[in-house]
């Protein structure tokens, strides 16, 4: 998500960082800054009416405002903008599946290319984490590829998919699918519908008929964040014909300018419920306006980072890992597993962007180079036997040549990895020794920072 708001974030941080005067926020300073804020929001594709209302609210609060003793002028202005940005993003929507009997029906609508089918699978995973039994219905009868895609995704996540041959009316497919979900005693039935390249009467008539027939408890518009201001028009167009209960904004980690997320709620009146990131099926986040506002203003998003970590690391595994570190028994297999868990949390840049003050550091990482180095490390370790992963001392010259052939790397790459791993083991041993003695080290062991920076994917290029 960092890329989506990068340009807007840099502009707003630059503008708000120029406030320095003590006492009161002066009107001329506020007006000058708000002109730049207005321009930054418009360049980010925020709808003009939303920009005007936002600027008016900030001006009213900022002009002549007393600066809190604990803040400087820039921090005071940042606080006001942060609070008004949260207000503009609106209260988050949440799925309400308390009405009626199971299966509760969730209808996904949107244009082609927005990611409806992938989002259906992501939503199924989210619901299953909440303890519900999801069921998918392939009601996009316009595109056989969409039916096949949903069936493939269903197999990947082990969720039942109801589908029929193309040509049968979508409302009928949806009705039969819901009956099948009821027979399977599913808790939630997610219906994937057809899209078009643009809103047209035929699409809306079909969706209206389908909605009247199945009476969904939630009708969610899946919208591509990279469509900019057009996303707002799409939301308005769908809401006028098919009453929406929420929005799912997809591809928020792409090159979108971020304006759609800010203005969709304000213009359509429909709350954002989820943000979709990447193609990985775990890439669906609950929408939190305060967290999104913090990211835009460079204040980080530690809560989301913690939630991502909790999804990948359970308490028992964490205790086992800590025990290995204390006893200095951390192996290459442990290293591989932890690295894979961190990768599932998202890119290194996106994770750093959630840490307050680390947004600019994240920009210094070359995503392709970092990903390439991590893939190389994975290939090397996968080419080792379990005994070699447990005890790297077994890796003599002939074994290293075998591993190099199996992983498509050079022996020097394996030597470099083993050297870095020994350095990390030594560092963990120093930490573990201090902790085992009942005290935390006051500072990093000698050379620890250099060893950390030398680890795969953790050594950024020089700042630009």
Image (cartoon, rainbow, N blue to C red):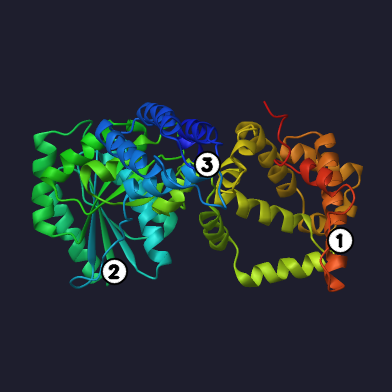
Quarter of the image where one finds residue 401: top right
Q: CA distance from mark 3 to mark 1?
A: 46 Å
Callout in the foreground (2, 3): 3
Mark 3: few/some/many CA within 10 Å (<14, 14-19, 20+): many
Q: Is residue 205 above or below residue 255?
A: below
Going 55% across and 35% down the picture, which residue do you hit? 17
Closer to the camera, 211 or 169? 211
Rendered location of residue 152, percent (x, y): 38, 49
Q: Which residue is mark 2?
A: 186
Closer to the camera, 272 or 113? 272
Closer to the camera, 106 or 299? 299
Query: Mark 3 or mark 1: which comes first in sequence?
Result: 3
Which quarter shows the C terminus? top right
Label 3 SS: helix
Label 1 SS: helix
Q: Which residue is mark 1?
A: 429
The reply, left or right, for residue 370 in relation to residue 146 is right
Instruction: Give the label on residue 73, or none.
Output: 3
Q: CA distance from mark 2 to mark 3?
A: 55 Å
């Amino acid at each position: 998500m960092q890329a989506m708001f990068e340009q807007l974030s840099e502009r707003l941080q630059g503008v708000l960082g120029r406030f320095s005067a003590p006492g009161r926020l002066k009107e001329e300073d506020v007006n000058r800054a708000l002109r730049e804020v207005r321009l930054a929001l418009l360049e980010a594709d925020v709808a003009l009416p939303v920009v005007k209302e936002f600027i008016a609210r900030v001006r009213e609060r900022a002009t002549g405002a007393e600066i809190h003793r604990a803040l400087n002028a820039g921090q005071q202005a940042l606080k006001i903008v942060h609070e008004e940005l949260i207000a503009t993003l609106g209260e988050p929507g949440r799925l309400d599946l308390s009405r009626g009997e199971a299966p509760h029906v969730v209808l996904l609508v949107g244009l082609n290319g927005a990611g409806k089918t992938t989002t259906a699978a992501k939503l199924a995973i989210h619901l299953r984490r909440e303890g519900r039994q999801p069921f998918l219905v392939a009601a996009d009868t316009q595109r056989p590829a969409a039916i096949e895609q949903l069936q493939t995704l269903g197999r990947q996540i082990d969720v039942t998919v109801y589908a029929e041959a193309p040509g049968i009316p979508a409302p009928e497919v949806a009705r039969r699918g819901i009956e099948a979900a009821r027979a399977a005693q599913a808790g939630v039935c997610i219906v994937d519908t057809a899209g078009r390249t643009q809103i047209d009467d035929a699409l809306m008539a079909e969706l209206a008929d389908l909605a009247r027939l199945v009476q969904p408890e939630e009708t969610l518009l899946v919208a591509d964040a990279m469509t900019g201001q057009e996303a707002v028009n799409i939301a308005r167009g769908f809401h006028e014909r098919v009453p929406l209960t929420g929005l799912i904004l997809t591809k928020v980690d792409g090159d979108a300018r971020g304006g759609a997320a800010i203005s969709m709620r304000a213009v359509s009146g429909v709350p954002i419920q989820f943000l979709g990131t990447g193609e990985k099926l775990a890439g669906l986040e609950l929408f939190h306006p305060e967290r999104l506002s913090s990211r835009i203003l460079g204040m980080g998003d530690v809560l989301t980072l913690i939630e991502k970590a909790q999804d990948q690391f359970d308490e028992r595994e964490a205790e086992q890992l800590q025990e290995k570190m204390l006893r200095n028994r951390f192996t290459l297999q442990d290293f591989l597993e932890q690295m894979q868990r961190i990768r599932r949390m998202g890119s290194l840049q996106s994770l750093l962007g959630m840490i307050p003050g680390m947004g600019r550091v994240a920009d210094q990482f070359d995503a392709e180079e970092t990903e390439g180095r991590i893939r190389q490390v994975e290939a090397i370790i996968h080419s080792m036997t379990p005994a070699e992963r447990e005890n790297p001392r077994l890796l003599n010259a002939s074994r290293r040549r075998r591993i190099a052939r199996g992983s498509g790397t050079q022996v020097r790459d394996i030597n470099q990895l083993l050297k870095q791993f020994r350095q990390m083991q030594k560092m963990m041993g120093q930490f573990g020794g201090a902790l085992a003695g009942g005290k935390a080290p006051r500072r990093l062991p000698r050379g620890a920072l250099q060893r950390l920076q030398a680890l795969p994917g953790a050594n950024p290029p020089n700042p630009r």
